[in-house]
Image: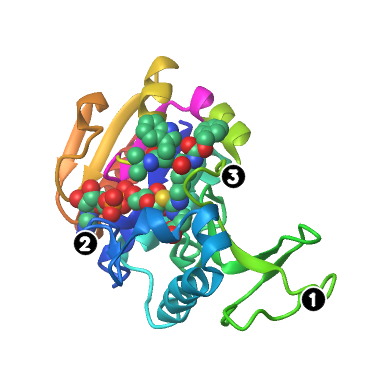
């Protein structure tokens, strides 16, 4: 069985990473869309850098939770038949042991050079405009996809959605596109669709089944169920 799992801010909420809905989408009085855009960066790069520098240093204080660990266990069992596509820019999936993770909105622990397009692992601040280790130019920006920018890996995601037997959404509000459209895409290719979320989302009507509750309980239970049945079948 080929499975594509889409995760959003809800899967990291219990680890202490604030969701976008938590702060009503506000950050220091800014609408998130106002600081997470290329225009905002051109206008006030230091404001945008402080936004991401704060989230990057906060990431060092949090740990993966039971939902992240359950998906890592599922990858052990399914191998290449599982792909986790995440809207999250944190590294909690990888810290839980997942390897097949596609960060469609980028990563906090990566910097992108606007001069040479080089990428470099980065775990400290960018606000003081450090030189790019590749070309030496001080044009490093957070390696995240801002509103109005094209998400990463869209071609790969379309191929995997077309092949999926099961599409599972975990901790997504269904408010941000193109991720919010993946369930319809998967449905069109005949996949079964399952939502695991704290509450109904904008996408709930598109799911064959929706289970509402906390990811740290729903995801381990769903994985045991899947693997449990898998064991009895073999
Ligand atoms: C693009 C990185 C063109 C930066 C992010 C169509 C219609 C309308 C608008 C658009 C449209 N198409 C494009 C747009 C514009 C825009 C958009 O969608 N705007 C919205 C606001 C209307 N989209 C774009 O600009 C995208 N680019 O479209 O380019 C294109 C497209 C395709 C192909 C070619 C070209 C780029 C969007 C990416 C922006 N960057 N992040 C950063 O992180 O700072 S988006 C950011 O917000 C996150 O990455 C995430 O994607 C989104 C937040 O959504 P969620 O993850 O769902 O989180 P949220 O807080 O909303 O909800 C949490 C959920 O969890 C809730 O449901 C809650 O109930 C649940 N929950 C909470 N606790 C728990 C829980 N569940 C379980 N357990 C718990 N404990």
Quadrant of residue 209 in the image? top left
In the image, residue 106 sits, relative to residue 168, either above or below, namely below
Q: Which disc is residue 22 wearing?
A: 2
Query: Which residue carries the number 3 mark?
Result: 152
Magenta residues span 161-174
Disc 1 from disc 3: Cα separation:
23 Å
Q: Secondary structure at mark 3?
A: loop
Looking at this view, name the residue that lies furthest to the front: 43
Quadrant of residue 178 in the image? top left
Q: Secondary structure at mark 1?
A: loop
User: Between residues 76 and 12, which one lies in front from this camera angle?
Assistant: 12
Instruction: Assign the N terminus to one quadrant of the image.
Output: top left
Ligand 1 neighbours mark 2 (CB distance < 8 Å): yes
Q: In x, y percent, where is residue 28?
A: 30, 72
User: Between residues 57 and 149, which one lies in front from this camera angle?
Assistant: 149
User: Between residues 99 and 119, which one lies in front from this camera angle?
Assistant: 119
Q: Which disc is residue 133 wearing?
A: 1
Neighbours of disc 3 within 10 Å: few (<14), some (14-19), many (20+): some
Looking at this view, name the residue that lies furthest to the right: 135
């Amino acid at each position: 069985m080929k499975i594509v799992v889409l995760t959003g801010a809800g899967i990291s909420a219990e680890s202490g990473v604030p969701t976008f809905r938590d702060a009503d989408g506000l950050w220091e009085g800014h609408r998130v869309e106002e600081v997470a855009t290329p225009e905002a960066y051109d206008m006030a790069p230091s404001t945008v850098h402080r936004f991401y520098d704060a989230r990057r240093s906060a990431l060092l204080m949090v740990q993966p939770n039971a939902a992240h660990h359950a998906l890592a266990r599922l990858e052990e069992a399914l191998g290449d038949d599982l792909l986790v596509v995440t809207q999250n820019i944190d590294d909690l999936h990888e810290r839980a042991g997942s390897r097949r993770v596609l960060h469609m909105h980028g990563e906090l622990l990566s910097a992108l050079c606007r001069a040479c397009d080089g990428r470099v692992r980065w775990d400290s601040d960018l606000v003081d405009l450090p030189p790019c280790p590749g070309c030496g130019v001080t044009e490093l920006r957070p390696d995240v996809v801002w509103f109005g920018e094209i998400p990463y890996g869209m071609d790969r995601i379309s191929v995997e959605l077309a092949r999926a037997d099961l599409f599972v959404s975990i901790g997504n509000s269904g408010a941000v596109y193109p991720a919010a459209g993946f369930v319809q895409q998967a449905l069109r290719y005949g996949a079964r669709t399952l939502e695991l979320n704290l509450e109904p989302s904008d996408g709930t009507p598109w799911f064959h089944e929706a289970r509402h509750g906390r990811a740290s309980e729903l995801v381990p239970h769903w994985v045991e169920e899947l693997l449990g049945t898998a064991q009895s079948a073999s």
